[in-house]
Image (spheres, rainbow, N blue to C red):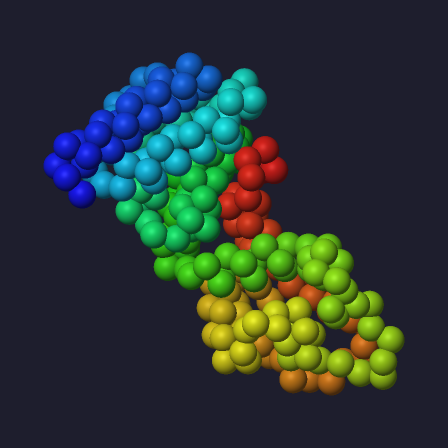
Amino acid sequence: MSEKKELSIDSRFHKASEIAIKSLTSAVPVFGGPIASIIGDIQGIRKEERFVEFVNGLQGDLQNLSDHVNIEFVSKEDFLDIFEQTSKKIVATRQKVKRTAFRHILSNSILSTDITYDEVEEFIMLIERFREEHIFLLSILRNPIKYDQETGNRVGKGGRLSTSISEIMEKLLPDWNEDLILEIATVLENERLVQNIIHRYRTALTDQGINHLANTLTPKGMRFVTFISSPGAV
C-alpha cells in the first residue's frame, strides 16, 4: 500500500472518529465534559475502527436514555478513572464480544442508581479475564428455556426416566467437548456466578429436560449478566 493511500485511510478514520465524538456529545450531553476529553485522548492510541465502534456504540446505548443518566455517579473522579481505563481496554481488545460487554458495563453503570464503583471495577476485571465462551454460557443460563427453544428444542422438556446435567449440556452445546464445558462452568462457579452444575454434572436426575438449568445463575451472576447486556435492562 502506498504512503498516500495509507494517509487517505488514516484521514478517513480520523474524520469518522471526529463525527462519532460530536454525535455522541450531542445525543448525550453528559459526555460533553471530562468524559469527552478522555475519549479524545484515547482516539489516537490504536485501532481507529474499534474506537469508532466504541463511540458509536455508546451513543446507541444511551441516546434514548439520556434522561436516566446518573449525573452524580458519572461526575466523580472514581468513575472518570474507570471510564478511562475501560475505554482503553475496549479499543485494545481483539474479541468483539468482549468489547461489547465492556461497553455495556459502562453504559449500564451510567444509567444505574444502585451500583458502586467497586462493583463496576469487579465486573470489568471479570470480562478482562473471561473468554468468549464464559460470556456465551452466561447468556444462555440467563434464560436456558428460551435459548433451547430458539435452537430447535435440542434438550426439550424431558419425559424419559432420567437425565443428567452432562447429557443436557452436551445437547445444548453440541460444538463444545466435555472438557471445555467443565472448564468454563468451573470458572463461573468459582466466581460465584453459577451454581449447581459441577457437583451434579453426572448425577442421575428425573428427566425435566432444560428446566434443570433454570436458576443456575446466582444472584450475583444474574446481576453481572444484566450489566453486560443491552442497556436499559438494569
Tally the marks.
Answer: 0
Answer yes or no: is residue 197 visible.
no
Q: Position of residue 15 (x, y in %)?
A: 28, 23
Q: Position of residue 115 (x, y in %)?
A: 49, 38
In this view, the residue in front, 76 or 147, is 147
Name the residue rendered at 59%, 55% in the picture.
139
Query: For residue 175, what is the image quadrant?
Result: bottom right
Q: Quadrant of the C terminus?
A: top right
Query: For residue 54, what is the image quadrant?
Result: top left
Answer yes or no: is residue 148 visible.
yes
Height in image: 160 above or below 74? below
**Left or right: 89 in relation to 141:** left
**Left or right: 174 in relation to 58:** right
Q: Residue furthest left?
A: 3
Height in image: 22 above or below 139? above
**Left or right: 87 in relation to 98:** left
Name the residue rendered at 42%, 49% in the picture.
96
Q: Position of residue 219 (x, y in %)?
A: 60, 53
Q: Quadrant of the N terminus?
A: top left
Name the residue rendered at 76%, 64% in the picture.
153
Height in image: 210 above or below 32? below
Q: Position of residue 231 (x, y in %)?
A: 55, 35
Name the residue rendered at 46%, 59% in the picture.
132
Height in image: 212 above or below 11? below
